[in-house]
Amino acid sequence: MSEPETSGTHPGQPRPVRLRDALLRARIEAADRTGVVVDLRDAEVARLEILNDALDPLFAQVPDQIDLFDRGISQGDTPRLWIDVVAHIMMGRDKRMYRFVQDTRFGRIVLAESHDTAVIVEAVTDYVARRIVERERAMVVPPEPQAEVAPPPRRSRFWPFVLGFVLGAAALFGLALLAALRSW
């Protein structure tokens, strides 16, 4: 066996490890770990692509004028298959389970979770149908309710008649009185 090299100043002590050698070992270890992570991410993306292909017949049936859905795979730290702006499919913790989630104002809710692509395709089909119905309801403008115009209250014609009669009688009495005073 060889003995560790010693420096000339302190006999018997091992020579300090060079930083360059330590950095090289650290980079090799990081590359090994990164390789595993990249392989897992590639496997996730491949499974999401399989599911995306299984969803092709569904989205082929969506009418062209409906632009709610923007399907695509994002390849970030967590690969996701986006269905629309608020719903996406990602892989579960075990990297084999699909998790179909929707972001709401109250947080994220899980709509479906399964290892089987057919179950997720069925859940996405139900989700797409519900979104189309919501869109149809939002697009229909109900007629504004017309406020019932109540006819104006019918006034009695009796009191105006009585008032006119009294005023006419008073005018005649006044004229008769005036004529009687002039002739005196």
Image (spheres, grey):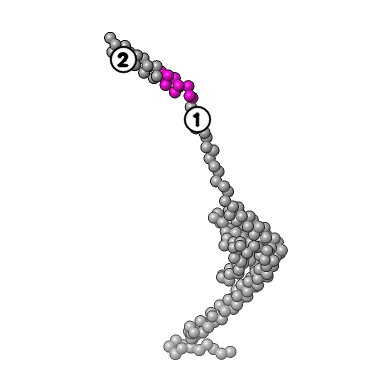
Q: What secondary structure is the magenta-colored segment mainly?
A: helix
Please, what secondary structure does the residue beneath circle 2 have? helix
Specify the quadrant of the image occupied by residue 89: bottom right
Residue 2, image x and y in percent? 56, 90
Residue 4, image x and y in percent? 52, 87
Q: Is residue 22 left or right of residue 130?
A: left
Relative height, residue 160 to residue 17 (above, below): above
The Cα atoms of the two marked residues, 2 and 1, are separated by 42 Å
Of callouts 2 and 1, the N-terminal one: 1
Q: Quadrant of the N terminus?
A: bottom right
Q: Residue at x 55, y 46 (%)?
A: 144
Give whichever of 142, 41 is nearer the camera: 142
Mark number for residue 153?
A: 1
Relative height, residue 57 to residue 32 (above, below): above
Range of magenta residues = 156-166
Specify the quadrant of the image occupied by residue 108: bottom right
Q: Is residue 140 left or right of residue 7?
A: right
